[in-house]
Structure formats: C-alpha cells, structure tokens
Amino acid sequence: MKHTRDAQAAATEQSFAADIVLPDQFSGASSALPDSERRLRLAILEDALRYYQHYYGATGSRARVLYEDAADWFASPDRSEPFSFENVSEALGLDPHYVRRCLQQWRDAQLTRAA
C-alpha cells in the first residue's frame, strides 16, 4: 500500500514539475484509485487545475470568474468542507503546500513569458 502511494506521489510530483500541468497527466492515476470518492476528488482537482491554467489572464467575465474560483479554492486553508482543497489533497496523498508552490511557479513563469 505504501509503495503504491509513494508511486502515485512521485508521478504527481513529476506532473507538477512540468511547465504546464495537464489534467490528462492524472488520468492513469484516476483509473487506479480504489473508490469512487477518490476518483471524484481527483476530477475536482483536475477541473480546478484546468480552470486555473486555461483562464489565467483571461479578460472575459465568465472566464475570469472561473479562474478566480479555482485560485480561491487552491488558496483556501478551509478544512470544514469535504471537498475543500486541503481535504481533496489529503485524500489523494498530495501535499497542498507543494501543489500551491507549483501553481505559484507556473504563474510566475507565465508572468515572465508575458514580460
């Protein structure tokens, strides 16, 4: 069990090390998850990543709302909701601080490219 969790964590870390995190990078892990609740949590994380990256820098009101909702979800330390970022991360064996750092690095790279 620990080996499987370590392998999933290593695969996730490699996914975040890339310039852009693609939701498709998690699809293999999704099929290996043991229960539907974990798959649901992974789908929530994938959607948030997709919205954060796809709508970053968007100027349209709907796109901006989607980005800001995802950014707020990632930033929230709330653990009271079952599908909060902190709880989703924990259920998937991810360190939320690490994910946040990776998102910050990705955003910084986007700012550098734009400059």
Image (tube, grey):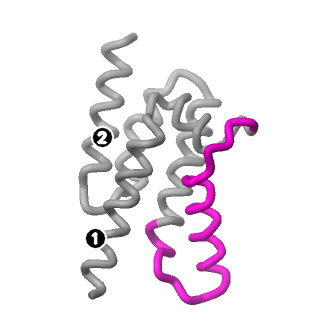
- Name the quadrant of the N terminus: top left
What residue is rendered at 32% in x and 69% in y? 108
Residue denoted by label 2: 13
Which residue does the image show at 48% across and 57% down from the upper left?
49
Q: State which quadrant residue 95 falls in.
A: top left
Does 114 lie within the magenta span?
A: no
- Magenta segment, principal secondary structure? helix
Count neighbours of disc 1 (C-alpha within 10 A) and say few if under 14, some if 14 to 19, many if 20 or more.
some
Q: Is residue 65 magenta?
A: yes
SS class of the residue under badge 1? helix
- Side (left or right) of 100 relative to 77: left
Position in image of residue 14 (x %, y %) = 25, 43
Q: Quarter of the image holding residue 60?
A: bottom right
Q: Quadrant of the C terminus?
A: bottom left
Mark number, residue 109: 1
Q: Is residue 75 above or below residue 92?
A: below
Taking the image as shown, residue 103 lies to the left or right of residue 6, namely right
The amino acid beneath tag 1 is: Ala
